[in-house]
Amino acid sequence: MTVTYLGVRHHSPACARLVARTVERLRPAYVLVEGPSDLDGRLDELLLGHELPVAVFSHYRDDERAATSWTPLCAYSPEWVALTAGRAAGAEVRLIDLPAWHPAFAGRANRYADAELRYAEATARLRHRFAVDSTDALWDRMIEADPDAPDLPERLDAYFDAVRGDTEADDSDRARETYMAAWIRAARTAAGDRPVLVVTGGFHRPALRRLAESGPGGPAEWPAVPAPPDTALSGSFLVPYSFRQLDSFAGYESGMPSPAYHQWLWEEGPEAAGRRLVRTVADRLRDRGHPVSTASLVAARASAAALAALRGHPVPGRLDLLDALAGALVTEALDEPLPWTRRGPLTPGAHPAVVEMVAACSGDRVGRLHPDTPAPPLVHDVAARLTALGLDGTAPVTLRLTDPAGLDRSRVLHRLRVLGIPGYARTAGPADGTDPVTEERWEPRPAAGRDAALVEAGAYGARLDDAALVALGDRAGAAADDCAALAEVLFDTVVCGAGDLAGPLVTRLRAGLAAATGPGPLGTALATALGLWRHDRVYGVARDPLLAAAVDTAVTRVLWLVEGTAPGGTTGPDRARLRALVAVRDALLHAGPVLAVPRDVATDVFRRVAADPAAPPDLRGAAHGLVHVLARTPQSGAAEAVRAAAAPAVLGDWLAGLFAVAREEVAAETADGEPGPLVAVLDDLVGAMSDTDFLVALPALREAFAWFPPTERERIAARLIARRGLRGSARALLRTPADPLALARARALEDHVSRTLDDLGLGAAR
């Protein structure tokens, strides 16, 4: 008996052809393939007749760890060819690697992400020897350029021997290789005098040969397939995959770049694949309005032929064609090297022609599963829930949240949303806990990847309710002490009706609030918790004591942080901090009974901040506004405070803080409809500014008045026109054809020129 070891690169057409030729030549008794051994009993399902690419999606979850991984397969994957050609030749086909849930794969999202990073030094030496830029270029030069070369097996052995060298396997690879070697020894014994073919990643081939041939012989005892613990949730299911996911240009470490090109190479051979690549690039560029002349394409073909001859390729290969097309179609200098000279995704700002070349080679093919493919329980549960609730159609749906039936339908759609299932877009509805909207509108839409997303969401649970709860729990854990992120999870938990999670989540939110170091994230969390505590009778958490405790914790923390704020300059208002103070204001006004800090104590804090000359201007303005609101001081107090903050460099920032928290109170009209004192004081202050001072103050003033809605800004403009005894349209005044700041700068420049001319005695009469 003989054992033939084929070390391959995953998703390599040349390796796939070699596997097919080897199966035809050997007619082996067994074909052993690197792949999850727990699928050995489901090979009929794997070979149902799917439209490739597809992937085996595996998941595992217990109390200590959660893991997901994908085993992608396309028509030119050597593993796929080994399975299909082996079966066709009458061989017994076995997958011989550890199951994907096994701890040996911990931290690895893709089974075929073998140790490429660990042998970077070896490939660097080979790249230098062959004068190429990247590992992919090296592989194309050595292997893909001549896939039918008689010495291809020797080339592959030499390549992988050099790459592995004396590299020690880590614990993960050692466990896998030991397990696969046990399968090889068993197959060698069971085969008798018939050959055995082993197809694995090339990195493993040297170690497998050594382990299998040095291990004990004896009767054929197939290794036991490890089973997950009874307490764990695990499973493996087929999902549609796409060329985009296979492409190393999209970030897939173990992918071959340009999967569409390699599909053409697999189906039609190198010459036809080259012609199709050039034609596809030209068509894509022309469709997007980029001119591509026939002369440019002729030049590209000639250049590709010359490059292939120079590099020793029988016919132009992928890199020959891409380099030639870039030379013919890109006429200006590029800021970065061409993307096929390295691995990884395209960088922003890549040349349009280069983008289209990469896209043409990548392709847009998406796989499709055979209709008889088994699906996880979640897929069936979701389908049944949508049908029962009348949500399985394509018409837009408007849901009244005050109606129990509407609320049930809303919760199902929100659970799909938090699971990341595409195709269910909410176009209207409450955005957070402060939003009093009681209706939602959803628009079902066809979405690529919806079926795959549902299968993958099965990793969270077998039922939609359970899966959404687990997904929310994972998000909460990932948020850690990020108050803003926890607030988002809290709102999603409420709209999903996941009451079992709400209590622990609010407890975690309180811990995050108590440890927060900045008022901005605190404000987001406080606004959400306060809004739910005040208004949420729709979802049933209004006046919840846990929410009340979170509100109290946030208010206390914001007050502590605000009074301890370090001195600030005049770099502009901190809008996140101001929004946090708005939330504190609302809590003091509407949730006083649940707060540990009484309103008068909070007011004293704000008085001290308002009077602190070292505090940032926007914070002092907000503190003054909060004193005005909480202590109900007269409007004249705000007007006097504005005069004290009249320095052009700080006035706008101070007003931004004031308007953020007390806009309506300090800018309200008097009882007889006249403008309040603040508007008059501001008009006088701005009118008395020099052109230079006005130019300094204008940007911050514009930002301050941005806290007013458009209708209120128009009303203030009308008051100012009337106060000056003028006539005109307030709306037109607010909609100048040019940027007011640019106009002010132009006016300042004109005045500067006039003064300079006057100083030189060259001024004209004015």
Image (cartoon, grey):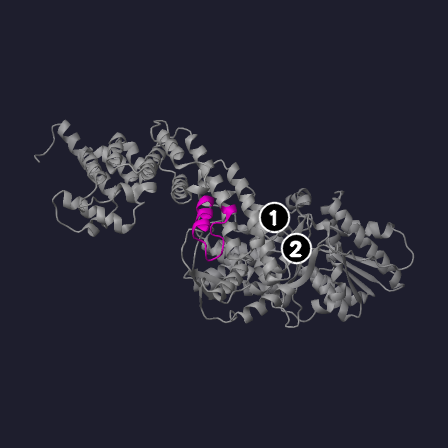
Above or below for 723 versus 413: above
> Can residue 74 be seen at all in this image of the molecule?
no
Looking at the picture, tell me which residue is in the foreground, 310 or 519.
519
Above or below for 576 versus 3: above
Above or below for 289 versus 169: below
- In what quadrant of the picture does the N terminus appear? bottom right
Q: Which residue is mark 1?
A: 134
Left or right placement of residue 354 versus residue 657 in this view? right
User: What is the quadrant of residue 101 in the picture?
Assistant: bottom right
Secondary structure mainly formed by the magenta segment: helix
Q: Find the magenta span and give its range.
A: 525-547
Where is residue 273? Give x, y as percent. Answer: 59, 64
Q: Which residue is mark 2?
A: 69
Q: Residue at x 80, y 50 (%)?
A: 178
Q: Amino acid at mark 1?
A: Ser
> What element does badge 1 sit on?
loop
Tell me the crowding category of disc 1: few under 14, some 14 to 19, or many 20 or more residues within 10 angstroms, Cα based: some
Where is residue 223? Give x, y as percent. Answer: 83, 57
